[in-house]
Amino acid sequence: MKYAGLVLANLGRNKLRSLFTAGAIALAVLLVCLLMTMPAGLDRLISDLGSNTRISVHNKAGLVYSMPQSFTRKVRQLDGVLAAVSMTWFGGAYEEEGKVTFPNFAVEAEHVGSVYPDYVFTPGAVEDFVRHRDGAIVGRKIMRQYGWKVGDRITLRSTVWPANLDLRIVGEIADDNAPMLWINRTYLDETLKAAGRGGLGIAGIIWVRVDRPERVGTLMSEIDEMSRNSESPTASETEKSFISNFFGSLKGFVTIILIVTALVSLCIVFIAANTASMAVRERSGEIAVMKAMGFGRRAIFGTLLAEATLLSSFAGALGVAGAIALTRALKTVATLGPTLGPLGNFTVTNDVVTAGLALSLVVGLLSGLVPALGAARKPVVDALREVF
């Protein structure tokens, strides 16, 4: 403790340089902490969107290939299946012809409520969806985007089917994480029959709700086995896995983010090391005098290393605190409206806090080690010769 005053005095000797160095380290640590929240935030987003009792059944060849609609009825008959609904891509364009600006599907209206009991619909939406052949249920995000309200009529021009459907909005999915529009499958089927296309006899995806989470794996195997020798073999997966595949491109992005994080950490070391070297170089004569007065190598080494470590640790704590405040602010704003969307899932956890503080400590040790070691080992005569 007898050297604490000396360390603090030396840090305050060039206040502007210490302030800028601390600011650079704090900003870098803040950035690193924010980047480190992305992998866990992405996993949390997928977990929030997916259900552990809902599975997706689609053609094994890919989502662009279909299955017979009759297969949906077979799936419903399996033991452990509470409900199943088929969805077929409609590809309807609203703003301009040929441009799809939001996902829209033809679904079995009578089964939607049973498969998605966790979705919050406006009162009477599911019942009106079944009752009205031209009904449509729309996600809240799309409703706000276009200024629609329940009761409005819109027209979607399909980019896949020879059908332009005039729709009545009968309900809203009160969830910002559900940016899609559902139309009544019966309406599209009848429209295609009237156009001489033979109706809609296919299903793009079958969503299945299982009675118990432990039955999910067994039922996926049963469904795939049931279609194994057919013309449309299926591949079943959990809803979380299905959503995760759509975020597959982001996994590579997260890897890049982690690499950038490592590079940022390395840059912090170089910045702090350069500052520490300048401080030691400017005080060569003073250090030589201290040695002549009886200060040992260990004392010189310890005080110089403590300066770099203390400055870096203090700046790192500020950076971590800034990251916590920023993510909390984003989460608060995200709860007030859909502007920030999934950014509310990115939070600074205890692991991130520990990593940020440890990073700042390591930066201080590494940046101060070489200058402190060099100053401690330099002979007094050589140091005085540089001054005089």
Image (spheres, grey):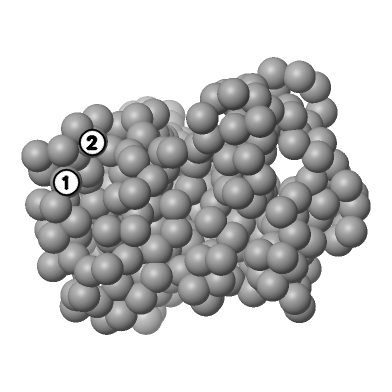
Above or below: residue 83 compared with residue 297:
below
Tell me the distance, in whole angstroms, between the alpha carbons under discs 1 and 2.
Answer: 7 Å
* Residue nearest the viewer, comparing 210 with 140: 210
Q: Residue at x 70, y 22 (%)?
A: 99
Residue 197 seen anywhere in this rendered image of the structure: yes
Query: As drawn, is 66 to the left or to the right of 347?
Result: left
* Secondary structure type for disc 2: loop
Q: Which residue was labeled with disc 2? A: 232
Query: As drawn, is 338 to the left or to the right of 364?
Result: right
Residue kind at label 2, given as amino acid type: Ser
Q: Which residue was labeled with disc 1? A: 227
Which image quarter holds the C terminus? Answer: top left
Q: Position of residue 382 (x, y in %)?
A: 26, 32
Q: Position of residue 263 (x, y in %)?
A: 36, 34
Residue kind at label 1, given as amino acid type: Ser
Which image quarter holds the N terminus? Answer: bottom left
Q: Position of residue 15 (x, y in %)?
A: 65, 52
Above or below: residue 298 compared with residue 166:
below
Contact between marks 1 and 2 (CB within 8 A): the answer is yes
- In the displayed orientation, state which residue is furthest to the top: 98
Q: Residue at x 27, y 81 (%)?
A: 212
How many neighbours does mark 1 have within 10 angstroms: few (below 14), some (14-19), or many (20 or more)? some
* Residue nearest the viewer, comparing 4 with 340: 340
* Residue nearest the viewer, comparing 190 with 122: 190
* Secondary structure type for disc 1: loop
Q: Residue at x 32, y 66 (%)?
A: 76
On the image, which quarter does residue 214 sit in?
A: bottom left
* Residue nearest the viewer, comparing 293 with 180: 180
Q: Position of residue 169 (x, y in %)?
A: 80, 55
Q: Residue at x 75, y 76 (%)?
A: 124
